[in-house]
Amino acid sequence: MSGNGAFQERVGRADKPLDRIGVYVCHCGSNIAGTVDVEAVAKWAAEKLGRRGVIIARDYKFMCSSLGQELIEKDIKELGLTRVVVAACSPHLHERTFRKAAQRAGLNPYLCELVSIREQDSWVHSDKHAATEKAKAIVSGGVERIIHHVPLEPLRVPINPATLIVGGGIAGIQSALEIADSGFPVYLVEREPSIGGHMAQFDKTFPTLDCAACILTPKMVDVGAHPNITMLTYSEVERVDGYVGNFTVTIRKKARSIKTELCTGCGVCQEKCPKKVLDEVFEAGLGYRKAVYTPFAQAVPKYPVIDRVNCTYYQKGTCKACEKFCPTGAIDFKQADEIIQVQVGNIILATGYDLFDPRQIAQLGYGRLANVFTSLEFERLTNAAGPTNGKVVLRDGVTTPQSVGIVHCVGSRDRNYNNYCSVICCMQSLKFAHLVMERTGATVHNFYMDMRTAFKDYDEFYQRVLSEGALFVRGRVAEVTDAARLPGEEGKLIIQVEDTLLGKQRRIPVDMVILSAGLQPRHDAQETAKKFGISCSMNGWFIEKHPKLDPVATMTEGIYIAGCAQGPKDIPSSVSQGAAAAARVVSKIQQHEMALEPIRASINQDQCSGCRICNNLCPFNAIAFHADRVVSEINPALCQGCGTCIAACPAGAITGTGFSNEQILAQLEGLLMLNIDVDGGRAKPREEGVRA
Amino acid sequence: MSTNGNHNKPKFAMYWAASCGGCEIAVLNIHEKILDMDANFDVVFWPVAMDAKYKDVEAMPDESILLTLFNGSIRNDENEHIAKLLRRKSKILVAFGSCACEGCVPALANLSSTREIFDAAYESVSTDNPEHLRPIPAYAMPEGEIRIPEFYPTIRTLDQVVQVDYYMPGCPPESHQIAAVIDLVVQVLQGKAELPPAGSVIGAFGSTVCDECKRTRDVKKIKSFARIQDFRPDPALCLLEQGILCSGPATRSGCGALCPLAGAPCVGCYGPANGALDYGARLLSAIASVIDSNDPEEIDTILDGIPDPAGSFYRFNLAGSVLHANRKAWN
């Protein structure tokens, strides 16, 4: 194809009346008009694309405003437009806005196309002339493409009213209660034996210092007792099939070795079990549990689990103490994992975070120097139900520290580990400082980079801890060591730090060091994201649909995220997100059915030779192979229109509505301005034999 | 074959432009059907089979030849001249064989400059050319100027030079398909059938070679590429799944999947299937999408197992592809 001549030949003479196309060029205030001469683009389109069917071209300050939309609607009605091209921002932002406007005026919404002259033009160029010329090309491409559009109808699918929530921390609990209280069923999956999450490990919560258990356990009990909530603890999601409104989730219920229908939660088994196991999860390695255990006294559900790796019976074949003493005969050593499937319409992922492992920063001494603690260890130390019954003592279990150093930003805001701020550490460290002083009277030094106390009542709490006498050293800790050099350092941990306010190096001897470790994405966050068809950011947190305007939805319809799985956050924010995700889900459920975008791929069954190249590529498992007919087929309800299979099909047997070869190639010809001053409507179809 | 002096029979012509002669052999290979041709047609021009001069063709009235099978691509001005001449003289012009349809193997020369092509042809170690002679299009002799055909920078397909009525793919087209087309034309002449719509592909089907291949197939995951001389492939399993670069998934059906059924990978001589615009790009993206790795370095290693990617993916289709030639060809 070369020049307008070849294009004219391909287009031929108009064999049907031309479409009546309207072109609308948006200024977007100065966002577009600052770089692109929008008036010139509109005038050019009316003149040069008139023979392609453009009968009106206008520019307007804000096309997306109600006045701008009314302008388009009026033209559709009064001028009888059959197609509309809007040149404005990215289709991500306003495609639906303009398609709805077209629909209100009686036009099929898919006969309206938004082309981007902002993200793809004005924002990335500074040369006004060149940007204006590019805008013309983009408009020309849009016009040539819209000629090939066909009216499409959305696919309507019913929405299953049940919801799956993954993760039984505070965010997941909040979501579960909100949805269940609205009258809809919830499946709450938690991989540990009890719900509660990290919050259940804490003693006090900032800034009000309420007892975490006092505010959390009533909610946990509500979840356990709620008629609309099915709790699946000690369980993990294995597989997700289906699509928004109709997910089928396969869940592995790990064998508890306890018959829950018989167990009363009396605790005799835990009492009698002779095997003590270091509790690395709930007690952060500071305390012991039994081989048959509930992680903590207020665990929900109340049923224990037998840890088969540590249970004497499973390892050596004898013992069965628990079975002997169980008053209801609830122990079942032969129980096997159970695979169940549940049908849900929406899914909320509230899978939380992992703590940064401070062993990675060797100079801070954790794991090497006994009295260096992580923040989670300290939470357990201060917890009244914890291994020391709430006594703040050194690793020996008896000595009360006289002086404590709290190191902020461990593994956060550090290009060697994580660039981001873990959000909660400043407030958590202040809480620790308060608790140490309250319980031991020890001197407390905080080592901070910047204090970030930017939410309701947070800075007041900072002022309070300051007034209580906590000391603050602005500087990053270089080293924690037990190598004494100066008098008074013997037997102490020495914190070597540059005090950046004094401008000098200091050595501060203390008895105990607490490392305020940052929050990290779950170690298996990538796998989880893949399982549910969503993405992780560079740092590994789940990506929201829009960082500001849609923080709990994801790019995959029907999958929502809440709490720390989306990024580090404190309890109030986690609860807010849990509730927000629930509200989004409930509003979806109450629509009863939903319209799926009709942008779908389909396989021409005559042309498909069943080579199976596409079979493994579909991220939504929408392609099935029929061995009897030796063809592949796409389930339109599962297909999200991503186009992967279309690109891969070597036979060209797969096409996508809204993105046919015709539409894409026509848009290219438009971009190359091959259509300028060419008569006629639709180009001849580019089918077999006819080559451009 | 003779013209028998019967001038009432419809006229038939066949011509070879830049081609190897395989297409002519394939026509002769239709066995006794050749007698049907002789009975139904008056062969007026067929350089490989009978003597004729271009000026005889030039003297024929326009559109006086009913059917012309044109094989070979357009390499020089002689090819172009005859293509235009036969277009003018023929009612039905068929691009016959891969060269005419899409350029075929000779069109891989579109990846080289004319100078490089001549270096290979006139100066390589196997060429005895002590005087370093090179073709000169026009040369003045005492008797007057003599000319040889002028060499074009790129090879073009027949439809890049003239309007083509039908396409008959294959390198060469399979004889049973040629016989079927001859049958069809004879039936049309007898009023028993209708011609397919102009622009159609004839003598082939619409889907791909996999449709005719009887090897069993599973989902495809390629960890490494191999060639048939490297190992003994499973005789019943899809060759591509065994890591052999088989072009069957992208290639138009109609040949009967002869090569893969004999244990050799399809090389793609029947060209793109219905609906595919650029054969090489289609095959390339299909193969790329079944590479079984997410590690960039491993992917590179796997892809290194494909010898001569341009020659593998565009063996038959370069001139007819969207790309047509690389920039060097125009230098």
Image: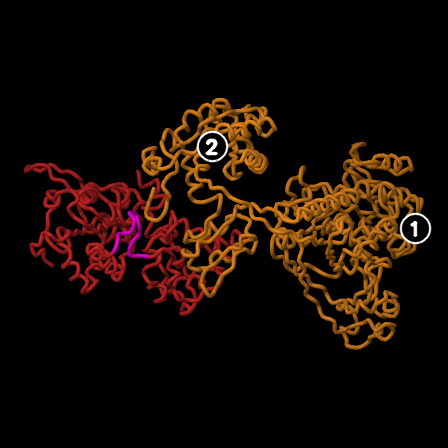
Chain colours: A orange, B red
Residue at 42 percent of width and 29 percent of height: A49
Q: Subunit of mark 2?
A: A
Image side of residue A584 versus residue A102, left or right: right
Please state, as top left, top right, bottom left or bottom right, where the N terminus of chain B lies in the image.
bottom left
| Residue A219 percent coordinates (x, y) | 83, 51
Image side of residue A397 versus residue A645, left or right: right
Q: Tally the marks.
A: 2
Label 2, on which residue?
A138
Q: Nearer the viewer, residue A80 or A545?
A: A80
| Residue A46 percent coordinates (x, y) | 44, 25
Mark 1 surroundings: few (<14), some (14-19) or many (≥20) residues within 10 A: some
Residue farthest toward the bottom in the current orientation of the protein: A318
| Residue A19 percent coordinates (x, y) | 43, 34
Q: Nearer the viewer, residue A648 or A622?
A: A622
Image side of residue B91 versus residue A38, left or right: left
The three-letter amino acid code for the residue at tag 1 is: Thr
Q: Nearer the viewer, residue B121 or B195?
A: B195
Label 1, on which residue?
A400
The three-letter amino acid code for the residue at tag 2 is: Ile
Callouts 2 and 1 close, C-beta under 8 Å: no
Can I make out residue A105 in this image? yes
Viewer-side label of 2, 1: 2
- Disc 1 on helix, strand or loop? loop
- Disc 2 on helix, strand or loop? helix
